[in-house]
Image (spheres, rainbow, N blue to C red):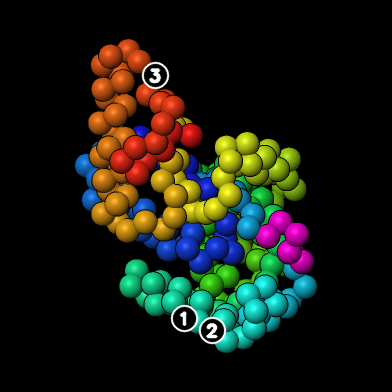
């Protein structure tokens, strides 16, 4: 089964969703291919070294509101073994980070690059929009930056828009069935089982598994 994850490395729920999907795949008794796809929550963000809390305060109405939001997210992350440090995080435009993931994916290190960038952003206070920082991370991953990938990332971002994706993480199963949000592990396991059952029935009947309606919490895109 193929699962495409649309996510942004500056999205905390995406990091949580990645971890939960990995746990779900471990519990699923089948072969799963996971492919990481880019999405930018803030394509106009500027990588200028600005602390993330200050940027969020302007967006969400002040430090008190930001503290409440980040506390809730950090508590959820901790339940999945993650330690977020929003105070150290730096606002960044994530396009070049997605290009690094594209380069890594081409060399079979896509999942490793995604996890490393999440950790850099949410736990280590690294600027994932900074060229020098990305170069160091690429070297750490063993990925050579050939300068390629920008057009390919733009095309994948355009595909996400064409699919109508407006929020992430979004898990796209077999190119047809979508589950949105950082769902609990048991929900993702149920989705894997449901998609396998649906595709098996469609294959047996010789029909296209892509339907026109949503039901049972899973939606054909």
Numbered range of the magenta stretch: 42-46
Considering depth in this image, is 33 or 178 the residue closer to the camera? 178
Mark 1 and mark 3 in contact (Cβ < 8 Å)?
no
User: Around disc 2, counting alpha carbons within 10 Å, would you say few (fewer than 14), some (14 to 19), or many (20 or more)?
Assistant: some
138 on left or right of 21? right
174 on left or right of 159? left
Tell me where residue 49 appears, x and y as whole percent.
Answer: 74, 76
Q: Earlier in the sequence, mark 3 or mark 1?
A: 1
Tell me where residue 57 appears, x and y as whole percent.
Answer: 65, 80
User: What is the distance, in whole Å, between disc 2 and disc 3 at their CAs?
Assistant: 47 Å
The residue singled out by tag 2 in the image is 67
Under tag 2, what secondary structure?
A: helix
Tell me where residue 215 appears, x and y as whole percent.
Answer: 34, 37
Q: Residue at x 25, y 39 (%)?
A: 193
Under tag 3, what secondary structure?
A: loop
Considering depth in this image, is 218 or 136 the residue closer to the camera? 218
Q: Quadrant of residue 218?
A: top left
Mark 1 and mark 2 in contact (Cβ < 8 Å)?
yes
Q: Which image quadrant: the N terminus? A: top left
The residue singled out by tag 3 in the image is 208
Residue 45 within the segment the image draws in magenta: yes
Instruction: For residue 51, say whether it is visible.
Output: no
């Amino acid at each position: 089964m193929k699962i495409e994850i649309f996510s942004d490395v500056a999205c905390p729920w995406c990091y949580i969703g990645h971890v939960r999907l990995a746990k779900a795949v471990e519990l699923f008794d089948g072969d799963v291919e996971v492919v990481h796809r880019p999405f930018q929550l803030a394509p106009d963000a500027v990588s200028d070294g600005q602390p993330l809390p200050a940027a969020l305060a302007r967006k969400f109405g002040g430090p008190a509101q930001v503290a409440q939001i980040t506390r809730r997210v950090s508590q959820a992350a901790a339940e999945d073994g993650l330690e977020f440090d929003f105070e150290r995080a730096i606002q960044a435009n994530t396009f070049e980070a997605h290009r690094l993931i594209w380069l890594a994916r081409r060399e079979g290190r896509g999942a490793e690059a995604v996890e490393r960038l999440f950790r850099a952003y949410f736990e280590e206070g690294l600027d994932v929009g900074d060229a020098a920082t990305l170069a160091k991370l690429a070297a750490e991953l063993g990925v050579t930056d050939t300068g390629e990938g920008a057009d390919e990332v733009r095309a994948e971002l355009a595909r996400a828009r064409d699919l109508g994706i407006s929020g992430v993480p979004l898990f796209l199963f077999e190119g047809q069935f979508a589950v949105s949000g950082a769902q609990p592990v048991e929900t993702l396991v149920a989705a894997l089982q449901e998609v396998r059952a649906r595709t098996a029935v469609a294959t047996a009947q010789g029909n296209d598994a892509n339907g026109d309606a949503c039901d049972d919490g899973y939606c054909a895109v």
